Structures are given as structure tokens and as C-alpha cells.
Image (cartoon, rainbow, N blue to C red):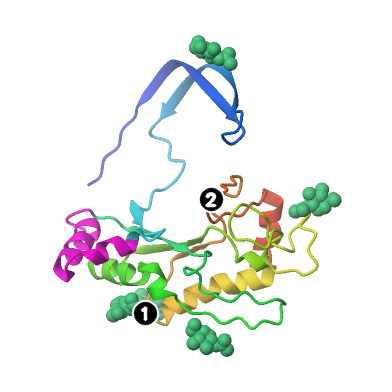
Amino acid sequence: MKYSALIVCATTTAVSAQAGYGYGYGMATRNLTFETSINVNAAKQHQKMIGGGCSGAFGAACTIGTLSKSDQDTVVKTLFDENQGALSILRNLIGSSKGATILPTCPKTLAGPFNYSLPGNDSCQLPFAQSALKYNPNLFLYADAWSAPGCFKTTGMEAGGGFICGVRRSNCTQDWREAYANYLIEYVKLYQQRGINVSLLGAFNEPDFNPFTYSAMLSDGYQAYDFLSIF
Ligand SMILES: *[C@@H]1O[C@H](CO)[C@@H](O)[C@H](O)[C@H]1NC(C)=O
Ligand SMILES: *[C@@H]1O[C@H](CO)[C@@H](O)[C@H](O)[C@H]1NC(C)=O
Ligand SMILES: *[C@@H]1O[C@H](CO)[C@@H](O)[C@H](O)[C@H]1NC(C)=O
Ligand SMILES: *[C@@H]1O[C@H](CO)[C@@H](O)[C@H](O)[C@H]1NC(C)=O
Ligand SMILES: *[C@@H]1O[C@H](CO)[C@@H](O)[C@H](O)[C@H]1NC(C)=O
């Protein structure tokens, strides 16, 4: 279907927000009030949307494993069949936590060994992708890492922030940027070996956010440049 529309709207909104500082311990808050006017010209295209999608990350892809084979099939068909859910993007987590990483043994030096394998079918993401491709052969598979393996980072841990060793201000004795680039490419190869092409590869998730409880890695724009120029 083709359509065009021009919508111009002007609104004045008063927004009241409470900003929280700290993580649970003695949180300080202050009140902020803003007024602004927003104009939207729907005829001007800023970005092209390639579709809608979903993710089976964090073990979600395994949950349908409790269903019968035919019910599993129905779930995936409902999501991805072009006459049903019509989703066209699948986002995979390139896992870095224990039991979910393609590099279960982190080498001590750049010399390796780097022994890669897909753990448990990549936390069920592999069979999920295979099944999704059956219903949408043009599926756009976006594989994204939340963090580099811990031993590639300033903190030595995959969760709780830290930077890739080798980017500016990382102060490491070894530069792990190339190892991280190879690690990401290895993920693509492991899928390729099983007949699946990864469409887009991501090295960061929320690089300005540092959750304490799960896989995360920090980077500012300059540090991202330092990695991407190797990648
Ligand atoms: C923020 O505003 C609420 C509602 O007006 C008020 O109850 C609260 O005390 C204010 N908090 C601060 C830190 O000023
Ligand atoms: C590499 O990993 C595989 C699968 O986890 C394991 O069977 C094999 O022994 C490992 N090889 C080396 C050299 O560590
Ligand atoms: C991996 O997925 C395949 C189907 O893609 C299935 O045949 C196989 O049993 C699964 N293996 C594991 C270890 O879950
Ligand atoms: C590296 O060292 C500098 C200077 O001591 C410091 O400011 C910076 O926080 C360090 N970076 C990391 C990632 O520890
Ligand atoms: C994957 O990509 C290669 C290179 O573009 C192409 O030759 C191949 O047919 C693709 N495979 C699938 C399953 O789409």
C-alpha cells in the first residue's frame, strides 16, 4: 500500500519530571519543569524503517521449547509469516555471560587459544532463527553484543560496565580490540556454517548505561571510533 500524508501539529506541553540520582541508596531527587513546542512534518523523511522485529535474547527463545513441536511452529509462524505478524527483523544477543558465550574459556594472552562454539544452540536463538527464516526467508538478522568477553575489558568482567582494552583511556597492558573484532566475526561464521547469514553486526548495546546486574560495556563516541577503526 502506498500513501502520503502531511501532518503539522503544534503542541505546548508542560512536562514534570523527577530525576533520580544514585542506585537505591539514599536517592536524591529534584523536580524539573519544562515547556516546549514541537512541530512534526510527516512529509519529511528522516529515517527509513526497514520493518518491525523481536528478540529471543536472555533465554526467551528457549521458553517456546516447552511447547509441542507444532505449537512452537505456530508461535513462530504467527510472528514472522508475512500474512500474520509479518515481523522482518530478529535481534540476537551475542551472549557474553557464563553458559551463553561462544568463548567459554577466556584466554590469558592475545596468543589464545580462542576455542569458539555455540553453547546449547546459542541459548535457543539458532533454532529460533532457523524457524523464523522458514516463514520469512528475507529475515533481517541483527546480531548484537551487550559486552565483549570479560578478559578483553578493563574490568575483567563482562557485566557491570568497563571498556574494551585498547581504546583511549583504557590503561590496559594488552590491546584486545582485534580479538574483539575477531570474536564478533566468529559469531557470524558460526551462523554461516549453519546456513544463516547475519545481516548486521553490533559491538555495543547501551554504551552510556552501566547496569550492575547484567552484561554491559561502556564506550563514548571516541572509544567506539577506536574500536570500529580496527573492526
Ligand atoms: C517535587 O514535587 C512534588 C509535587 O509538587 C513535591 O511533593 C515534592 O516535595 C517535590 N520534591 C522536591 C525534591 O522538591
Ligand atoms: C574446544 O571446545 C570444545 C567444545 O566446547 C571442546 O570439546 C574442546 O575440547 C575444546 N578444545 C580445546 C583445544 O580446548
Ligand atoms: C539444536 O537445534 C537443532 C535444530 O536447529 C536441534 O536438532 C538440536 O537438537 C539442538 N541441539 C541442542 C543441544 O539443543
Ligand atoms: C586510566 O587512567 C586515567 C589516569 O589515571 C584515569 O583517569 C582513567 O579513569 C583510567 N581509565 C580506566 C578505564 O580505568
Ligand atoms: C548468504 O550470503 C551469501 C553471500 O551474499 C549468499 O551467496 C548466500 O546465498 C546467502 N545464504 C542465504 C541462506 O541466504
- The residue lying toward the viewer, choosing from 117 and 194, is 117
Residue 42 position in % (x across, y down) = 38, 33
* Magenta highlight range: 61-85
Label 2 amino acid? Answer: Thr
Residue 109 position in % (x across, y down) = 72, 77
Q: Is residue 62 magenta?
A: yes
Residue 231 horizontal side relative to residue 33, left or right: right
Q: Is mark 1 within 8 Å of ligand 5?
A: yes
Name the residue tied to disc 2.
Answer: 213
What residue lies at 63% left-to-right and 69% top-to-bottom?
A: 180
Residue 86 position in % (x across, y down) = 24, 55
Q: Is residue 63 magenta?
A: yes
Residue 62 horizontal side relative to residue 117, left or right: left
What residue lies at 54% left-to-right and 75% top-to-bottom?
A: 104
State the CA–CA distance, disc 1 to disc 2. Answer: 34 Å
Label 1 amino acid? Answer: Gly
Give the label on residue 195, or none. Answer: 1
Task: Indicate the secondary structure of the residue bearing disc 2.
Answer: loop
Q: Quadrant of ligand 3?
A: bottom left
Give the label on residue 108, or none. Answer: none
Q: Name the quadrant of the C terminus.
A: bottom right
Residue 105 position in % (x across, y down) = 58, 76
Q: Looking at the rendering, which quadrant does residue 8 occupy?
A: top left
